[in-house]
Image (cartoon, helix red, strand yellow):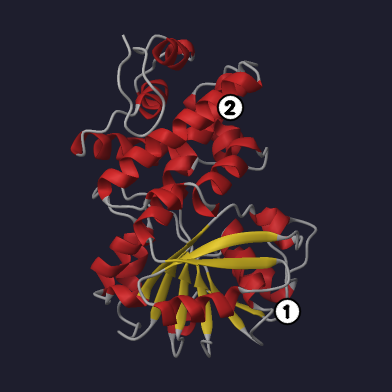
C-alpha cells in the first residue's frame, strides 16, 4: 500500500474521498484553492457542502500545492474536468515521475475531447501504468454517512490497481478492479448526459415508463460510442456503467439529475444554474460527446436532443418528439431498421 497520499480538490467528493482515506492513513492531505475550505476543515473539521457533518481530524487541509504533493506516493485528483489541465500545469513543478495519479473526476475535456487520465498523462508526462481512474455509483453524502458503497478502480498495472484498492478499501467502501480505463471514464462522464434527460422528463411528469426508456436507450448510446472508441462492452454493464447510471439518474442528490429536473419544471438554463449554484458537469460533457459522436460516426439521438435543449434553445418536448419519431429498429448494439 502507498505510504503517503493526498487529494487534490476539496469539493464535495474530494473532501469525502479524503475522509475515506483516513481509515487506512494516519494523515491525509487535502488541497483546495479556497481559503475558507481549508480553514474550516483544519479548525472545525467541517465542509460547507456537508454542513452538520464532521470529518476526520486526520485530514490536514492546505492551500499549498507543494505541501500537498511533496513526498506523496499517490495523488487523487478531484478537480472539475474543464479546470484539471490548468491545475496539472501547477502540479507539474512538484511531482515525481514515479508518483501514481488517480482521476476521481467524471468528465471529458471540451477543448481536446480527452478523458481525465489522458489529460493527466499528457500534462505530467507520466507512463500510463502510473495513471488510473476511480469511478462508480458514489454519491458523496451517502459515502460520508458510511452507507455501503462500491466503486471501480481502473488501471493498466495490476500492482498499481492493487495498491489503490488497498488504500481506499474500508468496511463501507468496496473497490472492484478493472483494466478498462477508457471504458470506466466514459461511463462516468457520459451517464451525466442521460441523467440530464431523465431530470427533464421527471420535471415534466412523464412517468417511470419514459424514464426507463431514456435510461435503457441512453445506455445503448454511450455503449456504442465507448465500444467504437475502444472500450470493453462488459464495462458498461457493471458498476461504473449501469450502476452509476442508475444512481445518477434516480437520486435527488445528483447534480445532473437536479439540473435537468429544474429545466423540466420550466426554468431556463441560467435559472437552473443559479438554483444549483453552478453548472452540472454533464452540460459541458454533452458538447464533447456530440463532437465524439460525429468523429466516430455514432448515432446518439438522446445526447443530440439534450444538446439542442441546452444550447440551441429547443423546447423541452424536442427530445420527446425526436425519440418517438425515430425509424423503427431492432434493439441492441447492432440495430437494424425494420421498416
Instruction: Decide if residue 278 is on the left or right side of residue 27.
Output: left
Residue at position x 65%, y 18% in the image: 207
Q: Secondary structure at mark 1?
A: loop
Which residue is depicted at the point 55% across and 66% down? 176
Residue 125 as seen in the image, left or right of residue 172: left
Location of residue 49 by image quarter: bottom right
Q: Residues within 10 Å of mark 2 (few under 14, many from 20)?
A: some
Quadrant position of residue 17 = bottom right
- What's the CA distance linking mark 1 and mark 2? 43 Å
In the image, residue 135 lies at what x, y percent? 50, 58
Q: Is residue 277 visible?
A: no
Q: Which residue is mark 1?
A: 57
Q: Is residue 203 above or below residue 130?
A: above
Query: Quick one: SS at disc 2?
Result: helix
Residue 321 seen: yes
Residue found at x 54% / y 42%: 245
Amino acid at each position: 500500500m502507498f505510504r503517503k497520499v493526498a487529494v487534490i480538490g476539496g469539493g464535495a467528493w474530494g473532501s469525502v474521498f479524503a475522509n475515506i482515506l483516513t481509515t487506512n492513513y494516519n494523515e491525509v492531505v487535502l488541497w483546495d484553492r479556497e481559503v475558507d475550505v481549508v480553514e474550516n476543515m483544519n479548525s472545525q473539521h467541517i465542509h460547507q457542502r456537508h454542513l452538520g457533518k464532521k470529518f476526520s481530524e486526520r485530514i490536514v487541509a492546505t492551500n499549498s500545492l507543494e505541501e500537498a504533493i511533496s513526498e506523496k506516493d499517490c495523488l487523487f485528483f478531484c478537480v472539475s474536468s474543464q479546470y484539471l489541465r490548468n491545475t496539472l500545469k501547477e502540479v507539474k513543478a512538484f511531482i515525481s515521475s514515479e508518483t501514481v495519479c488517480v482521476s476521481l473526476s467524471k468528465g471529458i475535456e471540451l477543448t481536446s475531447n480527452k478523458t481525465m487520465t489522458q489529460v493527466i498523462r499528457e500534462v505530467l508526462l507520466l507512463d500510463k501504468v502510473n495513471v488510473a481512474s476511480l469511478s462508480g455509483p458514489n454519491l458523496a453524502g451517502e459515502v460520508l454517512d458510511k452507507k455501503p458503497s462500491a466503486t471501480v478502480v481502473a488501471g493498466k498495472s495490476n500492482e498499481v490497481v492493487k495498491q489503490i484498492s488497498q488504500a481506499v478499501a474500508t468496511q463501507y467502501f468496496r473497490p472492484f478492479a478493472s483494466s478498462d480505463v477508457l471504458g470506466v471514464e466514459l461511463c462516468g462522464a457520459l451517464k451525466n448526459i442521460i441523467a440530464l434527460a431523465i431530470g427533464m422528463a421527471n420535471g415534466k411528469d412523464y412517468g417511470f415508463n419514459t424514464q426507463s426508456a431514456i435510461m435503457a436507450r441512453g445506455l445503448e448510446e454511450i455503449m456504442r460510442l465507448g465500444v467504437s472508441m475502444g472500450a470493453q462492452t462488459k464495462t458498461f454493464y457493471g458498476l461504473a456503467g449501469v450502476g452509476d447510471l442508475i444512481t445518477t439518474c434516480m437520486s435527488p442528490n445528483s447534480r445532473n439529475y437536479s439540473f435537468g429536473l429544474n429545466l423540466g419544471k420550466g426554468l431556463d438554463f441560467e435559472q437552473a444554474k443559479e438554483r444549483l449554484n453552478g453548472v452540472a458537469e454533464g452540460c459541458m460533457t454533452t458538447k464533447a460527446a456530440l463532437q465524439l459522436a460525429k468523429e466516430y460516426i455514432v448515432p446518439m439521438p438522446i445526447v443530440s436532443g439534450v444538446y439542442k435543449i441546452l444550447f440551441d434553445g429547443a423546447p423541452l418536448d424536442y427530445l420527446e418528439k425526436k425519440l418517438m419519431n425515430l425509424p423503427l429498429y431492432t434493439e441492441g448494439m447492432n440495430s437494424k431498421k425494420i421498416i
